Amino acid sequence: MFNFPFMQHALIAGTLIAIMSGLIGPFIVARRMSFLAHTLSEIGFAGASFALFMSWSPLVGMLLFSVVASMSVGGLGIKEQRSESLISAVSAVAIGLGIAFLSLSDKNATAATGILFGSIFSINKGDVLEVAILAILVILVTLLMFRPLRHFAFDYTTASFSLKNLQLIEVLFLGLMAVTVAVSAQVVGSLLIFILMILPASSAMRWGRTVWQIIGLSILFAVVGVWLALGLSFWLDLPVSFFIALIEAIIYFVSLSRKK
Amino acid sequence: MIILDGKDIGIKFDDRWLYQKVNFRLEQGHNLALIGDNGVGKTTMIRAMLGKVPLTTGEFIWHDDSNRKIAYVPQYRPDMQAFPLRVSDFVALTFDQGLRPWLSKLEKQRLTAILAITNLTEIADQRIDNASGGERQRAYLAQALVQNPDILILDEATANLDNVAKYALMDVVKNYQHQYQLTVIMVSHDIDIMKKYADEYLLLTKHGSEYEKIDQLDVAKLKEGGQILV
């Protein structure tokens, strides 16, 4: 099956995206920003439909919308960021905008499903290159700011006193999150962003006892999920997103049943 | 040596003064107890010292070099319990400067030494959420000490500890303090602890402040549990 170029592209892009999401996920979960990540993906959906309407690449639209949204969130206090009603309102507007742009763009239903549920088998060489550049960028920046980010995510109470450039770290982190959301959506779609960014990290938190162990396991769970799903999808001819969701959910439920 | 002078400090929120004309000094290697009624603004005073809250009147005059490192052990730790981090990894979270994603050899030595000083070596590989209250509080302390601070601020560190655990914790602080010339500010309601470990006290009230040697503290002014009588 690896003789098909579409399969090679899917494998390269999928693996890179899994590593990136697996790396950033534990920080998002530890900082309790999972719902914000989900909202960013809905904003990304609006961005992608806007891009279709403008005849740009969906990735560009997603990046634009989710980065701008995450930067404006950075201006809000932490209380507002976790406010469920505010997040619901923003989600609603984002999805509404997405539907509006889709209908304006006169594209068929395939384009919409692609954005919502991912379309990894249809990406070409150029797309792979885009994904690779962004993923490597996110991974590098995360590793460079690993120390402050670790303190920020895992023990915010003391980090807010000991980190001098807290604001900057917060904004950079939101930026990383936004890029990860936009890129991951290429594989799993904007509706299912949780399955690569949040589920592997949440599962890893049940097993790992150091930050590095948690990150390692999170990446492992994400990568294994993507590989298995690509294979299963190839043979059984069902959507990749379905299998990733299934596999990551199984890993998560098994982890949950583990005694703390 | 005096490292900090607080001169005529006043903090006002909206139209309400928390306190005015607060005067005190902080001596190197000493332990200053910060006392006051609940809600009088002890934590606010600390946040002001850390530069997080602006003063309405007065000023802090620092006499040491500006590279001073202040480590703060906050009262509430809402973030901690959700993660199964090991004690050693939790303590190492405060190694938060620099670009190196892993710990250097020097930092590892520092971590081992601090775990030993805080009597955590035996449980270093255990999960922090399984540790007892006293062990957790020592882990918070270790997390602060590992940064090699000049000033340590303890916010109600002994409040939820039993009689054995609170003296165990404060003995660790005292030993470290004497060995490394550490200056300590502790917010506390516990008269026994203050009398035993503090050198001076700063009593904050709505109407002003009182700064004296700890043996001048008039216990009669404090009601049961260390609350100040109005």
Image: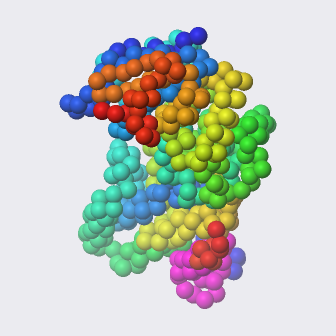
Q: Which colour scheme is used?
A: rainbow
State the residue at coordinates (72%, 24%).
B179
Q: Quadrant of the N terminus of chain A?
A: bottom right
Q: Foreground: B51 or A61?
A: B51
Q: Is residue A16 visible?
A: no
Q: Foreground: A9 or A67?
A: A67
Q: In which quarter of the image is the C terminus of chain A?
A: bottom right
Q: Foreground: A225 or A84?
A: A84
A233 part of magenta stretch = yes
The quarter of the picture where residue A243 lies is: bottom right
State the residue at coordinates (77%, 36%).
B113
The quarter of the picture where residue A47 lies is: bottom left
State the residue at coordinates (46%, 61%).
A34
Q: Give the main secondary structure of the magenta stretch.
A: helix
A157 part of magenta stretch = no
Work out which residue is located at the far front of the displayed protein and give it. B220
Q: Is residue A195 visible?
A: yes
In the displayed structure image, the side of residue B57 where residue B104 appears, left or right: right
Placement of A252 over or under A232, stated as above or below: above
Boundaries of the magenta span? A223-252
Residue B31 drawn at (x, y percent): 57, 24
In the displayed structure image, the side of residue A184 where residue B167 appears, left or right: right
Placement of B4 over or under B190, stated as above or below: above
Q: Foreground: B222 or A4?
A: B222
Placement of B170 over or under B78, stated as above or below: above
In the displayed structure image, the side of residue B228 where residue B132 appears, left or right: right
Residue B216 drawn at (x, y percent): 48, 19
State the residue at coordinates (36%, 21%).
B209
In the displayed structure image, the side of residue A155 where residue A215 appears, left or right: right
